[in-house]
Amino acid sequence: MHCLLSGNRIFDGGGLMEAERNDAGKVGRQNSHSLDEINGGSCYFTSALCYVMVRKRGVWGRLCVESFAEAVTHAHSTLSLTDLGRAVCRAMTFENTLWSREAREGRQSSDVGYWEVWHNTGARAVDTQLTFRRTVCPRRRALRVRCEHLECGIRPHADAQQPRWGAEGSGRWGRVVGGGGAAAGAWPWQAALYRDGDFQCGGTLVSRSWLLSASHCFYEATDAHWVARLGALRRSAWPRGPWEAAARVRQVVLHPRYEKSGFHNDIALLRVDPLPLHARLRPACLPPPRAQPPAGHHCTVVGWGQLYEHERVFPDTLQEVELPVISTAECRRRTRLLPLYLITDNMFCAGYERGGRDACLGDSGGPLMCQESDNRWYIYGVTSNGYGCARANRPGVYTKVSNYIDWIDGVLAAHTPRNSSANLEFDDIFSETELLETAENGRTTKFDKCKGHRCPLGECLPASSVCNGFLECSDGSDEWNCHKPSSNSSDKLDPD
């Protein structure tokens, strides 16, 4: 059985040689067998189980392994299927390879053929190669791998090269306030949170089933119908893009010591339907307990919040801005004469003394992220509060995530359904009762307070708006499966 997702490419330009260039003894240099001829590879997968796909000269095909042993023997190579599987999983940024084995496909697709590993005996002896060639693969024995533990905090390679908005001297000024538009897929853990169809706050994916956000977004609204939308660049775009996912928020966990006055312990966890993780939809990393980026270190804030303090103008495109971190002690010093700032040890600040760049209304709950020396992005702050937006000497205040790692770990452990794992599918994780709560094609069930129809982002339409000839949901689902009267008057007889 193939695991299909729209073409998630594994290798871009360097093949296995490039994918394993820092992994001596696996594929390539240690064995002196070049696989550079491959332009790329692909694995079509749901979760982490897939058949390996190879692309050579622009043509894709499954990797047939029926003659693999013969090819590596002739090449005097130590290359194994385990090595290939490990290269695939590493290239997809999974931490572990559970297994790599040959498996017989049940049926052959007419539009995708096969490639096989081949010992190119025509090459010079000093330049002996293992390469790929077309094959019919008569027994349809292909390479199948299973990977686990998608690495956190890794941005898609192409998007990681995008210019950084808001960097000093960049000359590129935009919004958040003071930042600019993000590239598609640039922040694969960013979530937009909707309450009954209306955008409210941001959030950050920290595991397959949990988001991190701010408690003040959900105060006195934990029982509302919340939907998390991930992988989106533009909030207005619908239908969803190929990398997007929308998930019902099943549970809101506010910090037990959250205080509305002063925004103390302004942090919350949201349990969502399990999400299909991939390169453009993955968690951010959580920092070590009590860790904090050094003062002056530039980190990034993202969100769909207001563009200006005094105008309720919200961007359609996700915005990003770089801000310098201000230590808790320094933030207290700068704001000691401002009664609206009550900076505790569980908070820190970010921003410029001159102002000009900041988070604003609607960015609440989103992440302040810092890239560490391992090139991963860690969520150090949850956007919490501030005095106005981007004002001079009025820094933004962020909940210090590293002070809540024990609480986060405790909540995830206490509320994770039994018998769950990172590789289980939706039906395996949720009980039958919980599955009944899910609307089928948007039609609500007895567990939903909505008596009409739920649109994809949670808006409740009254029954009178369903099948009334007007499209009111962004996807038109309120007009699906409607029984229209037949235009034929077969029950009426024409006179002779």
Image (cartoon, grey):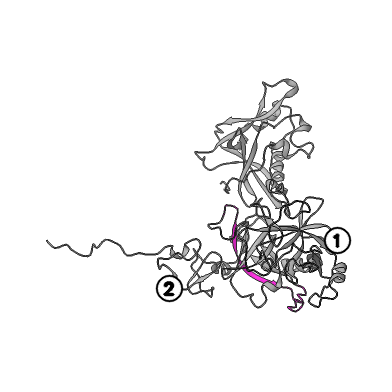
Neighbours of disc 1 within 10 Å: few (<14), some (14-19), many (20+)? some
Q: Main secondary structure of the magenta part?
A: loop
Query: Where is residue 214 shown, x and y percent of the image?
Result: 71, 69
Give the magenta part as a residue range: 241-265
Q: Quadrant of residue 414?
A: bottom right
Disc marking residue 295:
1
Q: CA distance from mark 2 to mark 1?
A: 57 Å
Q: Secondary structure at mark 2?
A: helix
Q: Is tag 2's residue or tag 1's residue first in the polypeptide sequence?
A: 1
Query: Where is residue 269 shown, x and y percent of the image?
Result: 70, 68
Q: Amino acid at mark 2?
A: Ser
Q: Amino acid at mark 1?
A: Ala
Which residue is more in the foreground, 74 or 489? Answer: 489
Q: Quadrant of residue 220?
A: bottom right
Residue 421 in view, yes or no:
no
Find out whether residue 261 is within the magenta segment: yes
State left or right for residue 127 relative to residue 108: right
Find out whether residue 166 is within the magenta segment: no
Which residue is more in the foreground, 123 or 168? Answer: 168
At 40% from the left and 68% from the top, the residue drawn is 468
Q: Which residue is mark 2?
A: 464
State left or right for residue 280 relative to residue 329: left
Q: Quadrant of residue 315?
A: bottom right
